[in-house]
Image: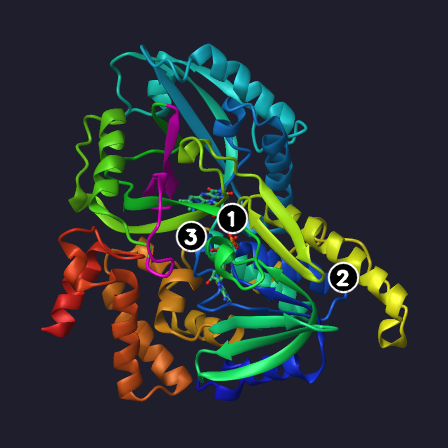
Amino acid sequence: MKSDPAKLTQRPKALQFFQESPLDLLVVGGGIVGAGVVRDAAMRGLRVGLVEQHDFAFGTSSRSSRLLHGGMRYLAQGRIGLVRESSVEKTIVQHIATHLAEPLAFVFPTFKGNRDWKLWQLKIGVKIYDFLCSGRNFGKSTWLDRDETLQKVPPLRREGLNGSVRYFDAFTNDARLVLDTLRSAAKNGAGLLNYCRFKTASRNELWDCEIEDLLSAETYQLQARAVVNATGPWADGLPHSQVKLRLTRGIHLVIDRKRLPLTDTVVMTEGKRILFAIPWGERLILGTTDTDYNGSLDHVRVEAADVVYVLDIAKRHFPEVSLSVKDVISSWAGLRPLIADSHGKPSEISRSHQIDNPEPGWWDVAGGKLTTYRLMAEQTIDRIVKWLNELNRLNRLNGSNRQFPSCRTAKEVLLTPSEVEGVSGILPPEFRRETVEHYCANEWAIHLEDVMVRRTRWHYYFANAPQMAQQVADWMSDLLRWPEAIRAAEIERYFHAVNFAKSSETSHFSGTAENAASRRVRDEVHR
Ligand SMILES: Cc1cc2nc3c(=O)[nH]c(=O)nc-3n(C[C@H](O)[C@H](O)[C@H](O)COP(=O)(O)OP(=O)(O)OC[C@H]3O[C@@H](n4cnc5c(N)ncnc54)[C@H](O)[C@@H]3O)c2cc1C
């Protein structure tokens, strides 16, 4: 089936939308926060557009632990409000995106001599955890004695094992949550542009903004009544921003689940920190770390020391499995955009969010979690709508008395089952040309990397992802009419994105989204 290239790129239409008349709201940043904000605004009838400098979900929102969670660790820190807020939100996300919220059981074992995590405290903790979810958690928490724990998690270390608690959160697919939230926003009339950078803005009666289409290198001017800075780790660098961030890096490793056959997620501890071993289909995700970060925001690498740290903790909990670097199929590194707090350990900094309005019509939205993205968006749009209504009243803007309805994002599902079937879920979709065609035609996929890394997660799931990328490049060449030179450049670009720099391989585990097999194949490709 040949596709119409005009259908495959909605960019000209989107660019026209941005310029033909002033926007009520321009959202900068296409991560989960920007996606939530643009959806909410569109559903309330605002004329809203969003620009993303890379691909949608390029930043932290495709590199998290993928948990919809209240936060057992925050409970231990006494942050009841945050846990309550996240616990309610995780159930809301399950309602609006059932295909992206799979209930997940966690076994939290405790060992003799561990002063930070005592079984009796955890037993009380999980009951509070269920209670904070208003009794609507994904399952009822229980306590397991030593034998019951080993029955549930046979490879677990036996020495010193006291027992465990078992509680529930949910597993998601972070990048898909962003993309489906954006698809929902588009259905409600929002204009969306990836590979388009917000450059600068000045405030006159409206905000005069300059954006650059990075595919054509053209600069465009547009006007907006309000601007939201939802740029995550980039938030303190945007002109007019008043955000102060402290960035910490976290990495994850993917291994074959046959190597460590877990059915429940297992919580692993190191001092007060907790790490997870999370089943993901035939794979297992191990992570994460939490270390201060000052490097490049566009190329966040997995360091060799991080890999050793995560594997060591896994080996301590599963001593008979003897995991090694050779088991790692893929990995990723992401940055937590935490509200600045120079004191204390990174893992102790609050994960709560902040919404500020430093200048008329400018909003900074920062911090928070994937789990609470919808609430962050609702609170932001509530404030913007209030401000726009006031502006309308004072200036009789447009000569109209527009009134915006209240938020509906907690009630209305993102997409219908037929819109997500075969293209969006927790596990990667089937490897088919038609699926790739869907991403190019309906989900703004422009580069090979967009399909391999974020739309499908094939890159992380399959050890032979680099070979699969050659086939996807063939399909995309056909669909998007790439000449051979572009096809070759796209493969190069994918390897660069997932493998960063060849020279760094000795000192870094390397790659923003490293795949163990990609090194081998890339070397073959370049030989
Ligand atoms: C290791 C790790 C594990 C985590 N695990 C979890 C978890 O399990 N559960 C959970 O709830 N939360 C988790 N989080 C937190 C969660 O992932 C983040 O809070 C969330 O993804 C941040 O989203 P964001 O939209 O603010 O930022 P991002 O996703 O980074 O999006 C910001 C976007 O803005 C774009 N941008 C920047 N500047 C510009 C510009 N000038 N013009 C246009 N676009 C621009 C960037 O390219 C980027 O795509 C985790 C975080 C990390 C790092």
**Residue 293 visible within the image:** yes
* Mark 2 or 1, nearer chain start: 2
Say what secondary structure mark 2 lies in: loop
- Most extreme residue toward the left is 527
Residue identified by numbered label 1: 244
**Residue 402 visible within the image:** no
* Mark 3 or 1, nearer chain start: 1
- Residue 284 vs residue 342, the one in the foreground: 342
Quadrant in the picture for the C terminus? bottom left
Residue identified by numbered label 2: 44
Quadrant in the rendering for residue 115: top left
Say what secondary structure mark 3 lies in: loop
Residue 131 percent location from the top left of the image = 64, 23
Residue identified by numbered label 3: 427
- Residue 388 vs residue 422, the one in the foreground: 388
Magenta residues, start to end: 272-299
